[in-house]
Image (cartoon, coloured by chain):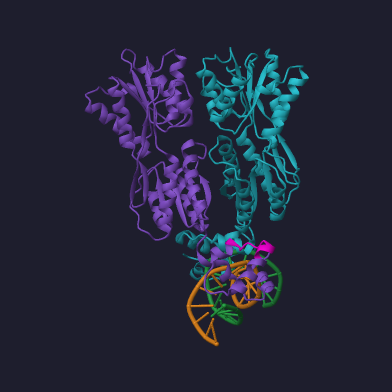
Chain colours: A cyan, B purple, C orange, D green
Amino acid sequence: MTTINDIAEMAKVSRTTVSRALNDSGYVSEDVRKRIMKIVEETGYLPSQSAKSLRTKRSNVVGVILPRLSTETATRVVNGINEVLAKQGFQILLTDTELDKNKEIEYIRLLKSRHVDGIILLATNVNDALTQAIQQADLPFLSIGQQLPGVASLVYDDYHASADLANMLVHRGHKRIGFIGVSEEDPAVGQLRQQAYLDTLKQNGLPIHKEWIEKGDFTIESGYEAMKKILRNSKDVKPSAVFAVTDRMAIGAMEYLKEQGYLIPEHMAVAGIGASLMSKYITPSLTTVDYSNKEAGRKAAELLLAKLNHEEIEDKIELSYRLIQRDSV
Amino acid sequence: MTTINDIAEMAKVSRTTVSRALNDSGYVSEDVRKRIMKIVEETGYLPSQSAKSLRTKRSNVVGVILPRLSTETATRVVNGINEVLAKQGFQILLTDTELDKNKEIEYIRLLKSRHVDGIILLATNVNDALTQAIQQADLPFLSIGQQLPGVASLVYDDYHASADLANMLVHRGHKRIGFIGVSEEDPAVGQLRQQAYLDTLKQNGLPIHKEWIEKGDFTIESGYEAMKKILRNSKDVKPSAVFAVTDRMAIGAMEYLKEQGYLIPEHMAVAGIGASLMSKYITPSLTTVDYSNKEAGRKAAELLLAKLNHEEIEDKIELSYRLIQRDSV
DNA sequence: CTGAAAGCGCTTACAG
DNA sequence: CTGAAAGCGCTTACAG
């Protein structure tokens, strides 16, 4: 490996000067600069980032903590993050918690030891151990998807998105609306979206039947099972519409309904949230909510960059959403 | 930040000893070890990876270069890579070329300057500049999906997978088989899969019509357009089956066929490659080939780790595949 | 405009 | 079993 010393020797200057030329810091005469740059070019010299990082305490690397790499949502967000960051010369150090809360905390520490300049966390839960770990890390930090106390958070408007969806079903004349949610450990998806559903039904004077409410775990299969349970448990009065808090679960529900010979939306309307690629191509196409995840990723990266530049940013930034009406309702 | 010196001071030993205790290298008396570990625990000390990396020339980071972050294939592969690497204490530094060949090379250099221990590239093309850049980097390197000359490559069996698919269509009685491919700049997807299609038709004495062959760019939309062209250009004798080299393009083709009132598979059979999630849930479900991308990612990580341990590995490792017959044929 | 020197936080021969 | 010293490749006051 060629080092800055090699370059200095070849250019017959001190390494101080080479460093200045390379970083455009301080004065370097035009002559010398050209001489240095030529040699850099020829040798293909690349400064050691470890040495730089050790010295400057900056790495131009941002840590990203994901709950799962294999979901469309996560991929889109990372895509947006990367788009903005790469342009600024930052790279992403990627970690995947596989939905393990301990790993969330472990990775925060690990990323810190790797001298990342900041961390973006796609959060799925909120707990004290987590917020504490974030405080301790004492690093520019951004949470996406969950509002973490005392942490800059970029959140989706889960409550209103869900309420809009429920209201839309009501306006379409549905009076019996089922619900497929997820664990309330997830404040955004599990609590807010469910609360909005309950509130909307209440506000419209519609009945809330426990038998019409089931929980899944984000997977297609769990949506399938939830739908099965709802149909089984609600013998006489079945819902005429069911609303799942994620597209995947909605698609699972549709699968079961199709198997049972239900026509969608005639016998049962179905809606989801997430605007997955699949939602568009499945038959019938799925009514859903677009959260613009990629844009969220971009925004997150921009906010983090702002923080790195010591700009003040708000603690809670809310994103907008868009209802997509299709054939499943 | 606490450093190794702080720990040494607190434990009243030299930093040499702390280092030994931390890395289990050399002798440290049980007493001293415990004393050190206790302090490490209490302070939450984490060694600086930059300093370590500068000193040891190892970073425990592996660079991954992707053509696109937002495809299922890439995501699955990264998932598999991460699964294996994370267990060994490695992190992934992620880069996305956005299908730009120059970036491929740029990122190889960049990753090297960041002292990654090795690089895994999901290649989409093969050219001299690329293989040269890899040689110059002089780093443990692994290519997935394309065979790069002189570079350890983990490849899918594109030829036989494609031939099997074509043969299957022939056995089902199809005599007029159309094809939606991609640019031949991509040796694996663009050349091998097409060659297998052509060879299979020839071997079975079936006609090859130029009008039945179109190219897309991996997107659903391009599959849609390709199907449209095939139908337009082949006025009298239309194919009875069409085979796309990716699921996305197959799904695009199905979209167009459905719009035009074609029944699938009665009027036109459709097949793809990739075993995307969507292929299972679209109507009719899509016949496709499963390349086990996640397993490929795992395997790639294992091979790279082997290389890092100076084990010899073969230059070309071929993966197997599995035909999934469903309702679209 | 340029350079000598110190130091970032580690590890590793070497000596004892 | 333990420590002093050198050095990894940079940047940055400081001095000139």
User: Is residue A21 at all visible to an observer of this figure?
Assistant: no
Locate residue B146: give its quadrant. top left
Which sits in the foreground, A231 or D3? A231
Task: Please state the total of marks drawn on the protein image.
Answer: 0
Locate residue A168: give its quadrant. top right
User: Is residue B55 at all visible to an observer of this figure?
Assistant: yes
Which sits in the foreground, B9 or A281? B9
**Magenta highlight on residue A170:** no
Instruction: Judge left or right: residue B177 versus residue A243.
Output: left
Q: Residue at x 73, y 20 (%)?
A: A201
x, y percentage for residue A170? 70, 16
x, y percentage for residue B261? 44, 12
Q: Residue at x 37, y 14 (%)?
A: B267
Which sits in the foreground, A208 or B80? A208
What range of the chain is rendered magenta?
B40-49
x, y percentage for residue A328? 58, 18
x, y percentage for residue A58? 63, 58
Position above or below: A67 against B229: below
**Magenta highlight on residue B44:** yes
Which sits in the foreground, B303 or B63? B303
Q: Residue at x 33, y 34 (%)?
A: B161
Instruction: Judge left or right: residue B297 versus residue A270.
Output: left
Position above or below: B172 against A126: above
Query: Quadrant of the image for the C terminus of chain A?
Result: top right
